[in-house]
Image (cartoon, coloured by chain):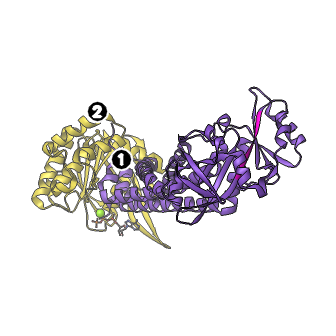
């Protein structure tokens, strides 16, 4: 073991070390929380697309995202069912409905309606109730997250939707739209009858599942040929389209980039400033290192190591803070998702920026004249 | 054998457009086991000469030879010679404040290429030699001036550099403490057969020296 001058100098001034690490942690938290909210929001924007067990989504022409559906004739589904390679295809109705609360207030509700939910493993997270019962009457499943908007509700409660009394027969979890409008699930016929002006004999989407081993490209091409007035997407394409719509139309993308940029800037300024001040304050020591035969490289390594230590400590603290914010964010109905790749990138970014900040001091180090050791 | 030889050393500083000649043709030679004092009035060029002999400053002309090898004039070659052959003691001690006495010595050994347990043992050996065996784990701020300078002496002696250069090592110490440090310094240098050159104003240094050199206006007197 060699004497670790880098660590000793860094920890010698504990207050400064704490300030540096806090600065990095602040920047990391800023970036991670912003990134987490961004991913969380976009996750809601596509969660129904990703969870519904379909390979192909067919929409009316130019539908911008899953929440803003337009109608087209429901009989089209038969053309899709007979396409070679398609295992099954069904109509899916997605539409906005008005719900009247016991208080008399009116709120929005996003309704997903199908004939046979179970076939599509949808909804994916059912807390109570059975989708098979939906066909038996004026029933619906409501996502538990609706409690925030609609007030407390329970199984067996009735709510008025578009003027009709419907009974809540089950609860789901995680079904949220980008707009945070709560999601309900009901029978296809029932939804059509409620929204008859738009959807009588018409549907919003056709979803299709391919047979195992079927050729996706061939199936897509054939569906497009048969339904020239619709758009046909793979599940991933449709999720991307829905996601991009929100990124482009709301400016949350720009907002995120700006915060990430600001976070990086704060981090760089803090680290560069401390390492630079530290270098300036230790000029005599670094001069001594040179006088006893050390090279510029020896001193660069000291600064680099200090930067790396600051980065690792700052990132760890920042990541811990971000995780600690998760439950707080959930309380205000915000989802914070920090995927491992994003964490890895953020860590790499922290390291690179801290090292780059250290390099700002390198030219000072190169200029240190060992003769200063004789000065008084 | 001469550890250090200097031939016709001159040094002229450039102060803006003005040339300031400081050293005018210095010749000297110091052998292993020899303790030499360099005395002279303030501004006579003592520190400048020591910097050149210590391969920290390049002479304007002339040649420095350490262990019979001429020192190159590029920074890398000079750093190499300092690393391998020279130990320094400064008026300002120049210890690392965040390192303990032992770590100060050990770090210098690390720079000089001795690592691990060997460096630690060597550091402890010289600290014992300078009488700081019981203060090894003290930070410089917890040591007295004399103790600090003894750590610096230990740092210079550690690693067996053949040439030890000291610039006013007692100037920041009271005379009693200074005498003590000099005594230890001299005895160890002698015992280990090092060549020791001490620059000083302090007349007491004369008493422990084998030879005294006097410099005046950049010229050595006889
Ligand atoms: N880097 C420099 N640039 C210009 N002039 C210098 C430089 N270093 C030293 N000098 C000049 O060289 C002369 C000798 O300086 P030096 O420090 O060698 O003297 P000294 O004998 O060590 O003096 P003291 O006893 O006060 O330490 C002085 O006039 C000083 O101003
Ligand atoms: Mg001087």
Quarter of the image with the C terminus of chain A is bottom left
Q: Which secondary structure lies at badge 1?
A: strand
Would residue A43 be found to the left or right of residue B173 on screen?
right
Q: Position of residue B179 (x, y in %)?
A: 12, 55
Q: Where does the magenta region start and end? A: A88-94
User: What separation in Å lies between label 1 and label 2 (alpha carbons)?
Assistant: 31 Å
Q: Which residue is mark 2?
A: B118
Residue A90 is inside the magenta segment = yes
Which numbered marker is on residue B180? Answer: none
Decide: few, some or many residues near mark 2? Use Cα within 10 Å; few <14, some 14-19, many ≥20: few
Q: Are marks 1 and 2 on the same chain?
A: yes
Reading the chain from its start, which is encountered first: label 1 or label 2?
Answer: 1
Identify the chain of the residue marked 2, using the numbered disc in the image.
Answer: B
**Magenta span contains residue A224:** no
Quadrant of the rendered image holding ligand 2: bottom left
Q: Secondary structure at mark 2?
A: helix
Q: Which mark is residue B5?
A: 1
Q: Position of residue A30 (x, y in %)?
A: 49, 58
| Residue B156 appears anywhere in the view | no
Q: Nearer the viewer, residue B178 or A111?
A: A111
The answer to whether residue B65 shows anywhere in this view is yes
Q: Is residue A194 left or right of residue A130?
A: right
Name chain B's colour.
Answer: yellow
- Residue at image point 33% right, 58% down: A373
Image-based side of B150 in relation to A185, left or right: left
Chain coloured purple: which letter?
A
- Whether A276 is drawn above or below B114: the answer is below
């Amino acid at each position: 073991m060699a004497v670790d001058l880098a660590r000793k100098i860094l920890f010698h001034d504990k207050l400064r070390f704490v300030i540096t690490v806090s600065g990095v942690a602040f920047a990391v938290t800023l970036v991670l929380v912003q990134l987490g909210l961004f991913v969380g929001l976009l996750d809601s924007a596509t969660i129904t697309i990703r969870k519904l067990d379909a390979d192909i989504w067919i929409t009316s022409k130019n539908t911008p995202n899953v929440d803003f559906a337009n109608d087209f004739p429901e009989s089209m589904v038969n053309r899709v069912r007979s396409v070679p390679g398609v295992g099954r295809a069904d109509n899916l109705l997605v539409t906005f409905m008005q719900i009247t609360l016991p208080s008399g207030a009116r709120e929005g509700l996003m309704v997903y309606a199908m004939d046979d939910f179970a076939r599509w493993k949808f909804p994916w997270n059912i807390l109570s109730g059975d989708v098979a019962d939906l066909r038996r009457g004026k029933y619906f499943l409501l996502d538990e997250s609706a409690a925030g908007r609609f007030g407390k509700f329970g199984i067996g409660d009735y709510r008025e939707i578009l003027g009709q009394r419907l009974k809540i027969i089950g609860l789901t979890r995680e079904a949220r739209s980008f707009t945070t409008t709560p999601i309900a699930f009901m029978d296809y016929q029932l939804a059509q009858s409620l929204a008859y002006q738009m959807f009588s004999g018409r549907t919003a989407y056709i979803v299709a599942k391919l047979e195992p081993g079927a050729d996706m490209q061939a199936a897509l091409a054939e569906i497009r040929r048969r339904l020239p007035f619709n758009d046909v997407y793979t599940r991933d394409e449709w999720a991307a389209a829905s996601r991009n719509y929100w990124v482009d139309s709301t400016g949350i993308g720009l907002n995120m980039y700006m915060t990430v940029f600001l976070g990086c800037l704060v981090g760089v300024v803090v680290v560069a400033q401390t390492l630079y001040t530290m270098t300036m304050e230790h000029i005599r020591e670094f001069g001594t290192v040179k006088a006893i035969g050390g090279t510029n490289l020896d001193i660069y390594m000291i600064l680099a190591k200090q930067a790396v230590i600051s980065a690792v400590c700052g990132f760890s603290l920042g990541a811990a803070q971000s995780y600690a914010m998760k439950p707080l964010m959930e309380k205000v109905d915000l989802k914070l998702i920090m995927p491992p790749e994003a964490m890895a990138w953020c860590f790499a970014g922290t390291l690179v920026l801290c090292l780059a900040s250290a390099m700002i001091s390198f030219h000072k180090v190169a200029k240190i004249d060992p003769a200063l050791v004789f000065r008084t | 054998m001469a550890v250090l030889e200097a031939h016709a050393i001159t040094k002229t500083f450039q102060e803006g457009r003005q040339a300031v000649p400081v050293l005018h043709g210095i010749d000297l030679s110091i052998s292993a086991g020899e303790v030499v004092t360099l005395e002279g009035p303030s501004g006579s060029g003592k520190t400048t000469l020591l910097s050149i002999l210590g391969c920290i400053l390049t002479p304007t002309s002339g040649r420095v030879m350490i262990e019979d090898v001429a020192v190159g004039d590029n920074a890398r070659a000079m750093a190499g010679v300092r690393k391998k052959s020279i130990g320094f003691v400064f008026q300002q001690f120049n210890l690392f404040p965040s390192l303990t006495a032992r770590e100060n010595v050990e770090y210098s050994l690390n720079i000089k290429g001795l690592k691990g347990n060997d460096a630690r043992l060597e550091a402890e050996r010289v600290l014992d030699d300078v009488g700081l065996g019981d203060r090894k784990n003290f930070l410089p701020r917890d040591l007295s001036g004399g103790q600090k300078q003894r750590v610096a002496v230990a740092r210079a002696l550690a690693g067996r550099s053949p040439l030890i250069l000291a610039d006013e090592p007692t100037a920041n110490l009271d005379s009693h403490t200074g005498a003590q440090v000099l005594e230890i310094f001299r005895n160890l240098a002698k015992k280990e057969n090092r060549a020791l050159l001490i620059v000083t104003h302090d007349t007491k240094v004369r008493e422990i020296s084998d030879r005294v050199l006097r410099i005046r206006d950049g010229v050595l007197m006889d």
